[in-house]
Amino acid sequence: MAKRAIIMGERKRIALIAHDNRKADLLEWAHSNRDGLAAHELLATGTTGRLLSAELGLAVRCYRSGPLGGDQQICAGIVEGRIDFVVFFWDPLEPHPHDVDVKALLRIAVVYNIPIACNRASADFMFSSPIMRREYRRFMTDAKEQIRDAETASVF
């Protein structure tokens, strides 16, 4: 399968998202990593972004709240190559009215080979990696070839 390289610069574009009962966890994590976060471009869904900006004193580009389309805006940013990394503290035990958007975000991150940390442990491991501080070549399978292969496989 054909793959193409996408260059992620030293300054990553990081999307930060947290469900309501995980916002405190994300804020605590962000406080612990404030200096590292300051070296990158930060984007976030509505309330999470406003909280992070106020608490950390850092510039955060805010999208809409998750249930009002913010998760979809993050998906679009990934697809359009404007987001390099996602920290998404989600709550899999709580029902969400926009659950399909949450699943779409997780799926798009995997399809586009975007690092996504879904809890503090994964965020700590990924964010402390030396790769976060240097250019990185992220490889992605050619989507057209993948779709063509899937269509061919379904023909009997």
Image: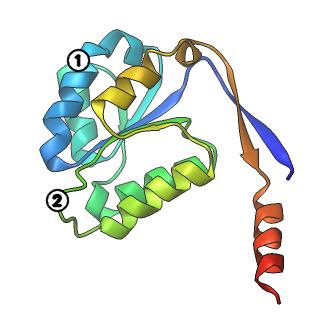
Q: Amino acid at mark 2?
A: Glu
Q: Is residue 17 above or below residue 33?
A: below
Rate crowding at label 1 as few (under 14), some (14 to 19) or many (20 or more) other CA atoms within 10 Å.
some
Which residue is rendered at x = 22% and y = 51% of the image? 91
For residue 43, what is the image quadrant? top left
Q: Position of residue 6 (x, y in %)?
A: 73, 36
Q: Is residue 121 left or right of residue 39?
A: left
The answer to whether marks 1 and 2 mark residues whose Cβ atoms lie closer than 8 Å is: no
Q: Position of residue 125 (x, y in %)?
A: 41, 22
Residue in front for this viewpoint, 68 or 111:
111
Residue under circle 1?
31
Which residue is rendered at x = 63% and y = 44% of the image? 81
Residue under circle 2?
94
Q: Is residue 90 above or below residue 54?
A: below
Callout 2: SS: loop
Residue lying furthest front: 156
Residue in front for this viewpoint, 149 or 9:
149
How far apart are the two marked residues, 1 and 2, measured between alpha carbons? 25 Å
Q: Position of residue 67 (x, y in %)?
A: 27, 63
Q: Position of residue 101 (x, y in %)?
A: 38, 64
Q: Amino acid at mark 1?
A: His
For residue 138, what is the image quadrant? top right
Quadrant location of the C terminus in the rendered image: bottom right
Residue lying furthest bottom: 156
Q: Earlier in the sequence, mark 1 or mark 2?
A: 1
Residue 43 visible to the viewer: yes
Q: Is residue 34 above or below residue 147?
A: above
Residue 76 visible to the viewer: no
Q: Is residue 81 above or below residue 37?
A: below
Question: Comparing marks 1 and 2, which lies closer to the viewer?
Answer: 2
Callout 1: SS: helix
